[in-house]
Image: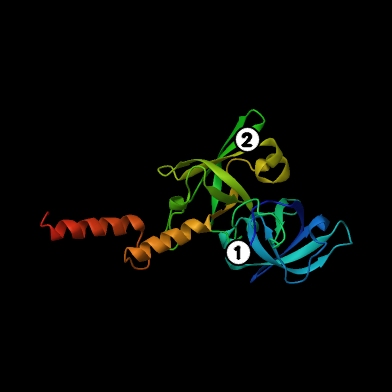
Amino acid sequence: MFTGLIEHLGTVSSIVVDAGGCTLTIANSAPILGDCHIGDSIAVNGACLTVTEFNNEKEGGWFKVWLANETLERTDLGERRVGDQLNLERAMGAHVRFGGHFVQAHVDTTATVVERVPDGDSLRLTFQLPEPTPSRPSLLPYLIPKGYVTIDGASLTLTAVDDTKRTFSVMLIQHTQEKITLSQKQTGTKVNIEVDMVGKYVEKSVVAALGGGAGEGVRALVEKIVEDVLRKKGIP
């Protein structure tokens, strides 16, 4: 489990690709490796990855993670290049303050930066979600203004949501711009998205309570209930 509060920016120093995926080496990572062990989980741009090797003393500290093809397909990590910076967060400890929101670091999809608008010292960013497919339904039902969203591993507050355009927006204050990579992303680039898992559990509970089956949305279930009521009353 993670909080979405980025601890450090690491730098991609090596990418080794093979048929099953790739090994990513992330350098300049000493600040988060002091208590590291092989097998630990670190959120890298919002994706929970397992440390397979690390060195906390050499060249500013580095660690390696393995990216399976599933991870490469679902995230933007396959598009990273040597020299790119990445948002890093260690798994949450039981003794720390919980300052963000519940983040699993299980990326749901990617979104595309479609607008960057300066607002004083702040920066407003707008993203567009991909067209939904049967295997990957729309995430818009889980996005609400002033709700949470995780973008490249950073817990952020939604400022606007447009269901018609499949877009949503956030605002980065100057402090946040300096601490995460998102302010560097230009229009047309992809980011990793994880929606608030609480919304997913609420939806599943509501669907179950309404007697819906797997794959049925809440809207479809409500329509079904209304149709049943009208039919029982003899209203066509």
Find residue 170 and report its image quarter. top right
Distance in Å between CA atoms under marks 1 and 2: 29 Å
Count neighbours of disc 2 (C-alpha within 10 A) and say few if under 14, some if 14 to 19, many if 20 or more.
some
Q: Where is residue 29 drawn, in percent x and y? A: 80, 56
Q: Is residue 131 visible?
A: no
Q: Where is residue 4 drawn, in percent x and y? A: 64, 53
Taking depth in this image into account, of 33 and 208 the one nearest to the observer is 208
Q: Residue at x 73, y 52 (%)?
A: 7
Q: Where is residue 3 drawn, in percent x and y? A: 64, 55
In the rendered view of the protein, which quadrant contains the C terminus? bottom left
Q: Residue at x 20, y 60 (%)?
A: 228
Q: Is residue 166 left or right of residue 236?
A: right
Q: Is residue 179 above or below residue 69?
A: above
- The dot on residue 126 is none
Q: Residue at x 85, y 62 (%)?
A: 56
Q: Secondary structure at mark 1?
A: helix
Instruction: Specify the farthest residue to the left.
Output: 234
| Residue type (three-letter) at the residue carrying disc 2 | Leu
Taking depth in this image into account, of 52 and 15 the one nearest to the observer is 52
Q: Which residue is mark 1?
A: 71
Count neighbours of disc 1 (C-alpha within 10 A) and say few if under 14, some if 14 to 19, many if 20 or more.
some
Q: Which residue is mark 2?
A: 123
Q: Is residue 204 left or right of residue 71?
A: left
Q: Secondary structure at mark 2?
A: strand
Question: Counting residues from the N terminus, which is met first, the one under dot 1 or under dot 2?
Answer: 1
| Residue type (three-letter) at the residue carrying disc 1 | Thr
Q: Where is residue 74 drawn, in percent x and y? A: 56, 60
